[in-house]
Image (cartoon, rainbow, N blue to C red):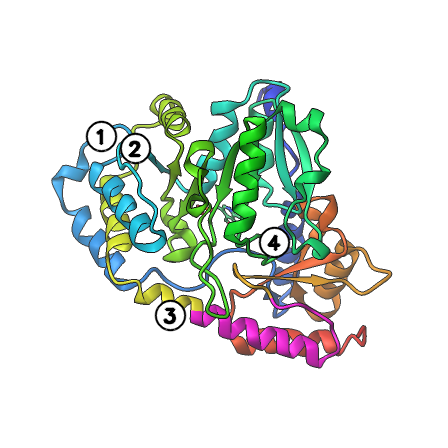
Amino acid sequence: MKQFPLSELLQSLPKQFFASLVDKVAKKMAEGHDIINLGQGNPDQPTPPHIVEAMQKAVANPKYHKYSPFQGYSFLKRAVAKFYEREYGVAIDPEKEVAVLFGGKAGLVEIPQCLANPGDIVLVPDPGYPDYWSGIALARAEMVMMPLRAENQFLPDYDEIPASIAEKAKIMFLNYPNNPTGAIASKEFFEETVSFAAKHGICVVHDFAYGAIGFDGKKPVSFLQAEGAKEIGVEIYTFSKTYNMAGWRVAFAVGNESVIAAINLLQDHLYVSLFGAIQEAAATALLSSQRCVEELVALYESRRNTLIDALRQIGWDVDAPKGSFFAWLPVPSGWTSERFSDYLLEKAHVVVAPGIGFGKHGEGYVRVGLLTSESRLQEAAERIAKLGLF
Ligand SMILES: Cc1ncc(COP(=O)(O)O)c(C=O)c1O
């Protein structure tokens, strides 16, 4: 078979750091070990039944067997506007300020291609979700990292960004509740972001993937709640985490009209739109009772409490995450995050994600997901205790 060489563009894509971890875990499992996998971000609960039922009904509707309208059904965009008004008190124009997406990842990867030219600077949180890097590479833009440090509650410090960089930056990615650190942001922080971005003409892309998941009675703040946010940015909201719909591939972008138009323009060239039945089920999710979301958040909070208590009991000095479904744990001194993760896999059969995979400033930490039962989280802590590291 002729081996066709990859284009330069594909060759320039960042290496998938976590692919090697997935291989190591698969090998251990094939050896028959009982692995507790806390390394991934795949929700373990099913989609709530009323959403599945809406989908089942909609699948039978011949209207949805045809092409969907370009840029999505209006009923879904109107549902998004209602959802933002109800949940965040933010007014959204459903036709001009909403773009329907094939999952949040698609929007996050598309935006640099919509707004950046080769060589333009895109500001990215470090540590951060690696898919931001992919879209920047596809746009041949340049990444400049914004360190997220514990002493700054894992928020970027805009005073650290040199004026020459800020002037050249076209886009800034942010993500709160944060993957991987579990940090949350305040409205004041978002207001500071709006004023920094407005001063330098930077488009803010707030990834609100964990928007529903805030602990200790604190509902996460939407970027669009900050005064002037819609003038200068967009928010990406996915159904994957709020409604356990990761496999359905549905999300939306809301906010700045010109950015929404740019996303729609790119998508007009790439796709038609999502299967109509998925759009109907998604609208059902947004407009129905949110009791299922409250229950999900309570489940994650209870798991968080179990995990953090168990780790503190074995002598591991850890902070509790304030949101998302991840805990960000410091590795013992003398270890790198990768060596520590390998050791936990080898000796305790517990999988955690090494912080270095999320960027240079992720070194010194591992990320643990709350995506398994409390008894398994407890058992993971017990297995780690036996290693005598703490
Ligand atoms: C921070 C963050 N953003 C975006 C996504 C993408 O979610 P989806 O593509 O399923 O909407 C994820 C998924 O893990 C995530 O962790």
Q: Is residue 150 above or below residue 373?
A: above
Q: Residue at x 52, y 38 (%)?
A: 194
Q: Which label belongs to residue 295?
A: 3
Q: Residue 252, image x and y in percent?
A: 37, 41
Q: Which residues are magenta?
A: 298-320
Q: Residues within 10 Å of mark 4 (few under 14, many from 20)?
A: many
Left/right placement of residue 215 relative to residue 255 reads: right
Q: Residue 95 colored magenta?
A: no
Residue on which disc 4 sits? 180
Q: Is residue 253 above or below residue 286?
A: above
Is tag 4's residue or tag 1's residue first in the polypeptide sequence?
1
Q: Residue at x 29, y 45 (%)?
A: 80
Left/right placement of residue 279 relative to residue 353 reads: left
Question: Would residue 210 be seen by someone viewing this image from the given angle?
Answer: yes
| Label 4 C-beta lies within 8 Å of the nearest ligand 1 atom | no
Is tag 4's residue or tag 3's residue first in the polypeptide sequence?
4
The overriding secondary structure of the stretch rendered in magenta is helix
Say what amino acid the circle numbered 1 marks.
Pro
Q: Is residue 149 above or below residue 376?
A: above
